[in-house]
Image (cartoon, helix red, strand yellow):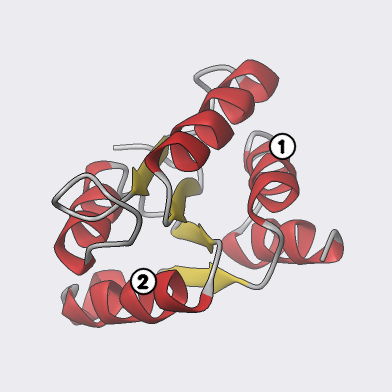
């Protein structure tokens, strides 16, 4: 289990979510657990609560998980996914109010230094 804050990118577009994570990995390598979630279950634009929850669990870290979203529906579904987590995990997941690409890169860069969840969120939100 990782001791580094993990990052989850949620977008209405799977291409944007995947592309953002590709960029993050190019910047910080594999030092930070990163996952993406984009599109609805039918393959169109949208987000899916269960898929978001699954991605959070896939990169779960005791240090926490920072979630970045692109639009209002993604934020609402991410909040619902976080609520579906057990209480102990829920307390270690935060939504970042940040632009998705810039915020994800800054969050991952900060996480790669071993920073706390609060420090990672602050780094993401500073670019907003």
Label at residue 32: none
Q: Is residue 7 left or right of residue 80?
A: right
Tag 1, which secondary structure? helix
Residue drawn at (31%, 62%) of the image: 47
- Residue 93: x, y in percent? 41, 68
Disc 2 to disc 1: CB gap under 8 Å: no
Residue mark closest to the camera, 2 vs 1: 2
Q: Is residue 93 above or below residue 28?
A: below
Label at residue 78: 2
Q: Is residue 116 above or below residue 61?
A: below
Q: Is residue 3 left or right of residue 55?
A: right
- Residue 8: x, y in percent? 43, 50
- Residue 94: x, y in percent? 49, 71
Question: 10 Å neighbourhood of mark 1: few (<14), some, or many (≥20)?
Answer: many
Q: Which residue is mark 1?
A: 109
In the figure, residue 64 lies in which quadrant? bottom left
All told, the count of numbered labels is 2
Disc nearer the start of the sequence (2/1)? 2
Residue 91 visible in the current orientation? no
Q: Is residue 50 left or right of residue 70?
A: left
Residue drawn at (36%, 71%) of the image: 78
Residue 15 visible in the current orientation? yes
Looking at the rendered image, the quarter that the N terminus falls into is top left
Residue drawn at (54%, 70%) of the image: 71
Q: Nearer the viewer, residue 66 or 89?
A: 66
Q: Nearer the viewer, residue 65 or 73?
A: 73
């Amino acid at each position: 289990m990782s001791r580094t804050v993990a990052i989850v990118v949620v977008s209405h577009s799977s291409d944007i979510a995947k592309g953002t994570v590709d960029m993050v990995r190019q910047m910080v390598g594999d030092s930070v657990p990163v996952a993406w979630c984009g599109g609805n279950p039918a393959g169109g634009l949208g987000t899916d609560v269960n898929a978001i929850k699954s991605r959070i669990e896939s990169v779960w870290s005791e240090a926490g998980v920072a979630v970045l979203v692109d639009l209002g529906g993604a934020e609402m579904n991410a909040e619902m996914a976080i609520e579906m987590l057990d209480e102990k995990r829920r307390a270690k997941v935060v939504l970042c109010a940040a632009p998705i690409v810039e915020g994800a890169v800054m969050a991952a860069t900060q996480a790669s230094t071993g920073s706390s969840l609060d420090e990672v969120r602050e780094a993401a939100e500073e670019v907003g």
